[in-house]
Amino acid sequence: MNVIVANKYQTLIGSLNIDVIPGKSIYGVFTVQDLLNQFSNFYFNKMIIDITAINNYENVNIMRELSLNFDMNKVILLLDDSPIVNSAMYLSQLVSAGIYNFTRNVEAIPFLIQNPNSYKDVASYQNFNNYQGESVMPNNYIQPGRIEQRIIGFKNITEHAGATTLIYMLKKHLQKSYKVKAIEINNNDFENFNDKSLESTDFLNASIRIANNSDAEVILIDLNDSDESICTEVIYLIEPGIIKLNKLIRNDRKIFDKLRNKKIILNRSVLNEHDVKDFERESGSKIFFNIPCLDEKLDNNSKINEFLIALGFSRLGEEHHKSGMFGKN
């Protein structure tokens, strides 16, 4: 059964035909801490929150606090008609905070109880291109992610294809020319690099970590088995050894059909240019880049630089040319 936290829209929510736990709904204006005190040790199916019941709700930081303290898969947020709450920036930051189940239509609440939104359902609210046309920005807003921010996910297709180590190397090279962050989801392999700037989290909190790094130009994500929808682009890694490839095909004979038109990288590869062409022909796929076995301890690796330039990181190309015969200027 469900609980209700309401203020301005108490009557509208009360008119819905939904199961509510008797005596557990609250009405008025509350802080996030008030809600924690009331519901942190109480089981409920869904919490329907009238946004006007949250003190200072137009400050998106308050909504982030709500997201950090509650499982947002269990929260449905009814928005009001405030210009701030309905602005593109505010809605985008709700999504960045991991708040997906929101609506302006009270009649949509029963549907959301049975069919909660995923990130894909609300991803369109994160179109940052609209912000350039907004002339008035409330002081309590956090600036959104940069328009050119790239969130690049990495996923191993063959077992242990090296996504974690590759991300570590890419970050070391990118940070010379870009503001970059690296995050791994549902694992703790980053701790083995003894680099405190590498972050590990679970999928539910990944969007919050991304939002907290909105000033980063590049975010590299070790996806493991998590949803790819939080990324702007995804790179698929294959280690092209015979045993690993045979095991991959046995597990899924249609794997290369699924990867068609995807960005495939051969990693820890011993294939030469001719071998790669044979691989493409036999698999019916197109290989974006072929990365050999590399020493992750090196701070400057030409093959990593070539790969990043191929991905479009042009500032690395500028540094590469500047350091030619006469060194850096």
Image (spheres, rainbow, N blue to C red):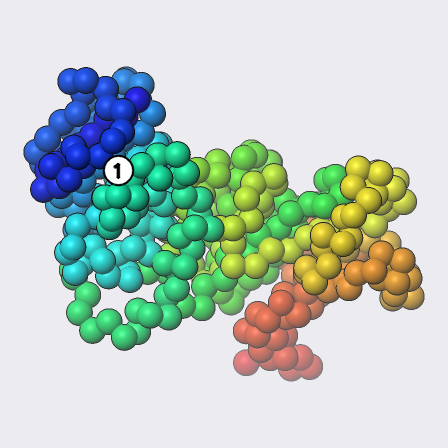
Q: Residue at x 19, y 17 (%)?
A: 22
For the N terminus, the quadrant is top left
Q: Position of residue 134 (x, y in %)?
A: 24, 71
Q: Position of residue 42 (x, y in %)?
A: 27, 18
Between 318 and 277, the one nearer to me in the picture: 277
Q: In the rendered picture of this protein, how many numbered marks are placed on residues?
A: 1
Q: Residue at x 50, y 62 (%)?
A: 150
| Residue type at numbered disc 1 | Leu
Q: Residue at x 25, y 31 (%)?
A: 17
**Secondary element at image label 1:** helix
Q: Mark 1 highlights which residue?
A: 66
Q: Looking at the rendering, which quadrant does residue 284 occupy? A: bottom right
Left or right: 214 in relation to 198: left
Between 108 and 214, the one nearer to me in the picture: 108
Does the image show residue 294?
A: no
Left or right: 284 in relation to 199: right
Left or right: 50 in relation to 299: left
Q: Position of residue 251 (x, y in %)?
A: 80, 37
Q: Position of residue 226 (x, y in %)?
A: 56, 41
For the C terminus, the quadrant is bottom right
Vertical side of 278 occupied by 318: above or below: below
Does the image show residue 223?
A: yes
Between 299 and 62, the one nearer to me in the picture: 62
Q: Residue at x 76, y 54 (%)?
A: 257
